[in-house]
Amino acid sequence: MEPITGKALILACSAIGAGLAMIAGIGPGIGQGFAAGKGAESVGRQPEAQGDIVRTMLLGCAVAESTGIYGLVIALILLFANPLVRLL
């Protein structure tokens, strides 16, 4: 059995970190679904305020989605452009 090298350890930990970073997509998905449901409920109660409700809901969804995108970017960096491997 071969000993684990530094590069192999960094790559293994980076893969685990990338998987953990992708868990960040769960929160925005739940939040956007909740916001869309509440937005539809609000429009049903006050149809005359539809423009304001939809605009506010879309702005909130865009902010929530940025969290998931940041997690995806971190995962891609860890998998394909790993800066830690270059330190060895």
Image: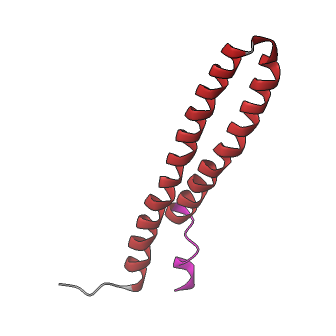
- Quarter of the image for the N terminus: give it: bottom left
Judging depth in this view, the residue of 70 and 48 nearest the camera is 48
Give coordinates of residue 34: x percent, y percent: 57, 34
- Asked whether 67 falls inside the magenta stretch, the response is no
Picture quadrant where residue 77 is located: bottom right
Q: Is 8 positioned to the left or the right of 75 in the image?
A: left
Give coordinates of residue 40: x percent, y percent: 64, 20
Picture quadrant where residue 9 is located: bottom left
- Asked whether 83 falls inside the magenta stretch, the response is yes
Identity of the residue drawn at 59% across and 49% down: 68
Give coordinates of residue 62: x percent, y percent: 71, 39
The relative height of residue 30 versus residue 41 in the rendered view (above or below) is below
Identity of the residue drawn at 67% across and 25% down: 39
Identity of the residue drawn at 66% across and 45% down: 64
Bounds of the magenta span?
80-88
**Residue furthest left as drawn:** 1
Give coordinates of residue 76: x percent, y percent: 55, 57
Judging depth in this view, the residue of 15 and 61 nearest the camera is 61
Judging depth in this view, the residue of 82 and 69 nearest the camera is 69
Identity of the residue drawn at 81% across and 18% down: 49
Judging depth in this view, the residue of 34 and 17 nearest the camera is 34
The relative height of residue 88 versus residue 29 in the rendered view (above or below) is below
